[in-house]
Image (cartoon, rainbow, N blue to C red):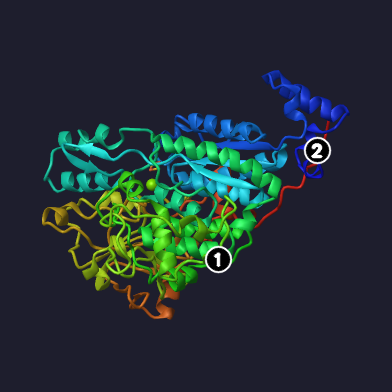
Amino acid sequence: MTEKKKDLRSRAWFGGADKPGFMHRSWMKNQGFPAHQFKGKPVIGICNTWSELTPCNAHLRQVADRVKQGVYEAGGFPLEFPVFSNGEALLRPTAMLTRNLASMDVEESIRGNPIDGVVLLVGCDKTTPALVMGAASCDAPAIVVSGGPMLNGRHKGEIVGSGTTVWRLSEQMNAGAITAEEFMSAEESMSRSAGSCNTMGTASTMASMVEALGLSLPHNAAIPAVDSRRYVLAHMSGMRIVDMVKEGLKISDVATRASFLNAIRANAAIGGSTNAVIHLIAMARRMGVELSLDDWQTHGRDVPTIVNLVPSGKYLMEDFYYAGGLPVVLRRLGEAGLLDKESRTVNGHTIWENVKDASCYNEDVIKPMDAPLAAHGGVAILRGNISPRGAVLKPSAATPALMKHRGRAVVFENYEDYHARIADPDLDIDESCVMVLKNCGPKGYPGMPEVGNMGLPPKLLKKGVTDMVRISDARMSGTAYGTVVLHVSPEAADGGPLAAIEDGDIIDLDVEKGTLSVALSNAEIEARLKARKTSAAFQDDGYAGLYQKHVLQADEGCDFDFLVGCRGAGVPADSH
Ligand code: FES
Ligand code: MG
């Protein structure tokens, strides 16, 4: 046995010629593993979010099989294990509610088991940050394999993008332009293969973020789920993690502050989801890396959006892969001086070595830096007396004419109030108004649901209005669009000044200046906050109660206060 192999933490379970060693090996042998598997091979955990309740990840058992082949080929011992699968499609009220829960599952599964390195199988939006956060708190050698996006949706000869097309068609139905039957007929056409959303929604964004961070092999973001090359990537990732264990290459060696800044710039370039702001901050803080909203403003705001994908542009993920994928984007950032070229990646090379020769095969899908989709594509951070700790807006998905806007507030106390009144023909609202939605932040509506892109009043949709300024402490789907101010911090239910806004108040938004304010003095705001009681319901028991007590605000990543930081992967005590 070599020196290196003695260092494997799995030896604490499988290495002993004693009673605990007997027990650990003996029980494992009921699965038919031969004795040589336990003799010092790196044990590779394959952390799987497979679930038939998470349709975007339902093919991950097959992906895991290919990872296993790679691990065996490289001389490792792969062991697949399930963790909580927080899928966006079915889970109510929102998959974000259980992101932190899943991360705890991952962290404790890694630390408590004989795992030397881990492959994280992810796909649907929140599964990616959940698994990276959990593994980061252990600082294990880790490599991410995403499930890949669905094929392009096709309906009546038109391209159908996951999520985005649903928003658009339902608006057309509410405006009376199409019938309910026409709306429903697009269902099968939208989701016609395995994989995650095919738009640049949160799933594709987070798959791109892990690639930009260097936590996956190149091309992880865009290879379609059903493309044979997705399985090659899985196989190669399985081979590579075995070497990473031998080299001792851990998450903290790869995901440094410099690589997080690379990811922030990449998010701007791809026109990525606003959810990434929350997830990247949460992931960074698990690694002890300082990252704040200001970094999004300072490093990302002026980076052009060059990827022409829905919802900011017109193509889908399949097109992105065929055009060259994320390596082309990273190459363009590097040539423009917007990439830390020395950042390491899981394949042992620097990010620049990985992307410097990437070729673009379609300049309409991945535009040149000097002819971008949006010149200042990064997420805008907005501060002022509505959002002292910040709010976000995605300029590439907004209406240019509304980016500087003054309007009268029309306030909805919570999501129920919004639903009860939005279709009322007597609602006192026109297209110049600013829609304000309260009590949908992390504590007010546990999980902070994706309702910030609240639909416009049907009477205005029928008039042909397509966008209005909307402000809330909620999130929005990465597939959504509009002039939507999100993540207002602190949230209304946590005493934030958003709670003080009333119907008729005058609100000023100036994206260029980064400001968001209401024409009220501090004294008026304080007096109103004192006089009102929140309509948010606080729960004492259950997971939602734990969530409300411990969740941090959006500017801090919505992690639980007690989970921030890295606790390592020391071997726990044995009790046999
Ligand atoms: Fe799972 Fe969009 S619903 S990726
Ligand atoms: Mg989503």
User: Is 246 placed above or below 496 here?
Assistant: above
Residue 21 found in image quarter: top right
Residue 342 found in image quarter: bottom right
Instruction: Measure the alpha-carbon separation of dots 1 and 2.
Output: 35 Å
User: Is 426 placed above or below 378 here?
Assistant: above
Name the foreground residue: 213 vs 531: 213
Q: Residue 452: x and y, percent? A: 35, 56
Quarter of the picture holding the C terminus: top right
Amino acid type, label 2: Ala
Q: Tell how many labels.
A: 2
Q: Residue 465: x and y, percent? A: 16, 59
Q: Is residue 555 visible?
A: no
How many neighbours does mark 2 have within 10 angstroms: few (below 14), some (14-19), or many (20 or more)? some
Q: Residue 485: x and y, percent? A: 35, 64
- Identify the residue at image location x=45%, y=54%: 536
User: Is 137 placed above or below 340 here?
Assistant: above
Q: Which residue is mark 2?
A: 12
Q: Secondary structure at mark 2?
A: helix
Within the displayed image, which quadrant is ligand 1 positioned in?
top left
